[in-house]
Image (tube, rainbow, N blue to C red):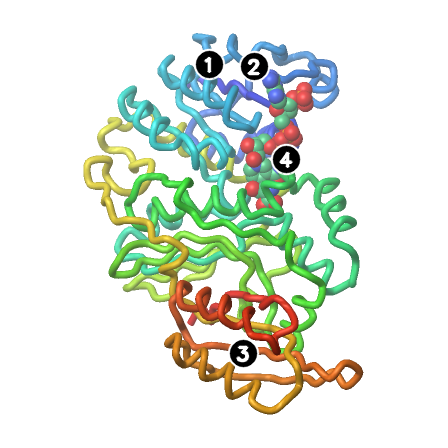
């Protein structure tokens, strides 16, 4: 049988990894796919650099538009990134009747509805395993392996760069800037690393997971996003002392009123599995009503781990080429005409536990006033710690709350900060037991 002809858009970290894995494991891959998978054309900006990796046997040029219109190409693999040129190229490839494999979560989180609709209309596949959690086959697991379940929630460490930074800072006491530079050198970070550190990349991925979990359209614009750039070293230290670790979590949860969709630094118990996911590793915890909790763990970024997912998609596309488009696995797990319009909840409506830290004057009545204020806001206290600072007659107070509605917490924080004996802003961190 003829080989499948692949056009590679981009030969950077992921494109280079994809080339290497396809070359190294060509025979095994062909045995699994039933046909050889052959890269016959590559588009980059710097052709000479690409030739150093690939040689001159494959056509390499700086003409991505030519590649997506090339009638000899069966599958276009988009590994350029961004959501302008990439959007145009992906839509053109679909329009040309080509299947698409992409690792581009930014593109799908913002334009996924349009792209999947165009692909369905043309009867082509858009596969995106590499777009979420790098080498972990979480899309396939949720879309196919867990189809029996009503998914209740998904929570995960889905950005390798920030997990790497937080882990290294905690274990080595190094600086944020040094660890960001290290993550960039290792090829983990996005072209614009603010996407990583401000939680945007994790929100792109979470948006896709939420769609697959709950059968809702892709709605990145409704995600609540808070990154790690405002975390202070003392937040990390304080969490440790209290038996917690801070992780940048993406959380999406089904509630009777709607769906929570949020990315933020989160305190998790130190002994929990997710707290011990370190470095650029990712982990996604899925709770389904039948299966209970399942944890998917593995490398979330980097050259070959991500290539592993890209190539798995290429094998899937190859196997599915002969299947009637109507009978393929739906892009977002649910049939296109069976999507739900369950609303995404505002962050004000989120329900979780909180760690509130503040500095107060160490004098009679302070605790009484604070606990009364929290009680009046409907917030129940789970634990409280006071650490006196003798030199300035103040004390550091930490309240750990039971689950509360975020709106009530924010109102309580505003009232607390207005009290004359409160001498700092209130540091608020959300907490999850993930039980
Ligand atoms: P890189 O920056 O390493 O590579 C981008 C590639 O695209 C380069 O080969 C570049 O060519 C090429 N390119 C960029 N613009 C153009 C253009 N206008 N015309 C032709 N070629 C172009 O990116 P990554 O490999 O890291 O990321 C690729 C995608 O994979 C992104 O969507 C990213 O979010 C996603 N991803 C990345 C992961 C990672 O660990 N790095 C993990 C999971 C997903 P040249 O080299 O000549 O400039
Ligand atoms: N920048 C991303 C990360 C790459 O650090 O997780 C993998 O998607």
Mark 3 or 2, nearer chain start: 2
Q: Where, quadrant-wise, is the N terminus in this rendering?
A: top left
What residue is rendered at 33% in x and 36% in y?
Answer: 331
* The image quarter in which residue 217 lies: top left
Regarding mark 1 in the picture, which secondary structure is present there? Answer: loop
The mark lying in front, picked from 2 and 4, is: 4
**Which residue lies under the disc numbered 3?**
399
Q: Is mark 1 within 8 Å of ligand 1?
A: no
Mark 4 or 3, nearer chain start: 4
**Which residue lies under the disc numbered 2?**
41
Give how far apart the Cα atoms at labels 2 and 1 are. 8 Å
Give how far apart the Cα atoms at labels 4 and 1 are. 30 Å
Mark 2 or 1, nearer chain start: 2
Image position of 296 (left or right of 334)? right
Give how far apart the Cα atoms at labels 3 and 2 are. 59 Å
The x, y position of residue 208, in whole percent, is 41, 43
Q: Which mark is residue 73?
A: 1
**Which residue lies under the disc numbered 4?**
192
Regarding mark 2 in the picture, which secondary structure is present there? Answer: strand
The x, y position of residue 4, in whole percent, is 45, 20
Give how far apart the Cα atoms at labels 4 and 3 are. 36 Å
């Amino acid at each position: 049988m003829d080989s499948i002809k692949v056009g590679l858009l981009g030969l950077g970290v992921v494109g280079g990894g994809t080339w290497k894995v396809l070359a190294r494991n060509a025979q095994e891959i062909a045995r699994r796919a039933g046909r050889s998978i052959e890269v016959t054309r590559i588009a980059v900006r710097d052709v000479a650099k690409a030739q150093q990796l690939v040689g001159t046997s494959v056509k390499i040029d700086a003409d991505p538009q030519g590649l997506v219109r090339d009638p000899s190409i069966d599958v276009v693999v988009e590994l350029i990134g961004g959501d302008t040129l990439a959007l145009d190229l992906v839509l053109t490839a679909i329009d040309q009747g080509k299947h698409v494999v992409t690792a581009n979560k930014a593109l799908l989180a913002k334009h996924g509805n349009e792209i999947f609709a165009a692909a369905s209309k043309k009867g082509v596949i858009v596969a995106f395993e590499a777009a979420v959690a790098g080498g972990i086959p979480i899309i396939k697991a949720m879309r196919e392996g867990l189809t029996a379940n009503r998914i209740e929630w998904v929570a995960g460490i889905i950005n390798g760069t920030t997990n790497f930074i937080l882990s290294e800072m905690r274990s080595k006491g190094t600086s944020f800037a040094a660890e960001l530079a290290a993550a960039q050198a290792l090829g983990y970070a996005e072209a614009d690393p603010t996407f990583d550190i401000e939680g945007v990349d994790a929100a792109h991925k979470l948006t896709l997971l939420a769609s697959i979990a709950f059968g809702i359209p892709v709605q990145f614009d409704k995600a609540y996003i808070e990154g790690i750039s405002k975390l202070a070293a003392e937040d990390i230290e304080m969490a440790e002392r209290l038996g917690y670790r801070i992780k940048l979590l993406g959380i999406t949860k089904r509630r009777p009123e709607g769906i929570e969709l949020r990315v933020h630094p989160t305190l998790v118990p130190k002994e929990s599995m997710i707290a011990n996911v370190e470095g650029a590793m990712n982990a996604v915890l899925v709770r389904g009503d039948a299966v209970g909790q399942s944890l998917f763990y593995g490398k979330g970024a980097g050259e070959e781990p991500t290539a592993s997912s890209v190539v798995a998609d290429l094998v899937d596309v190859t196997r599915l080429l002969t299947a009637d488009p109507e009978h393929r696995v739906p892009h977002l797990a649910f049939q296109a005409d069976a999507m739900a319009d369950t609303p995404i909840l505002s962050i004000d409506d989120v329900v979780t536990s909180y760690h509130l830290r503040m500095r107060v004057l160490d004098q009679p009545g302070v605790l009484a006033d604070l606990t009364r204020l929290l009680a009046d806001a409907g917030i129940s206290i789970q634990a409280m710690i006071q650490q006196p600072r003798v030199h300035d007659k103040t004390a550091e107070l930490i309240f750990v709350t039971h689950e509360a509605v975020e709106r009530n917490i924010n109102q309580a924080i505003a009232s607390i900060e207005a009290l004359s004996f409160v001498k700092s802003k209130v540091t608020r961190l959300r907490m999850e037991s993930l039980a």
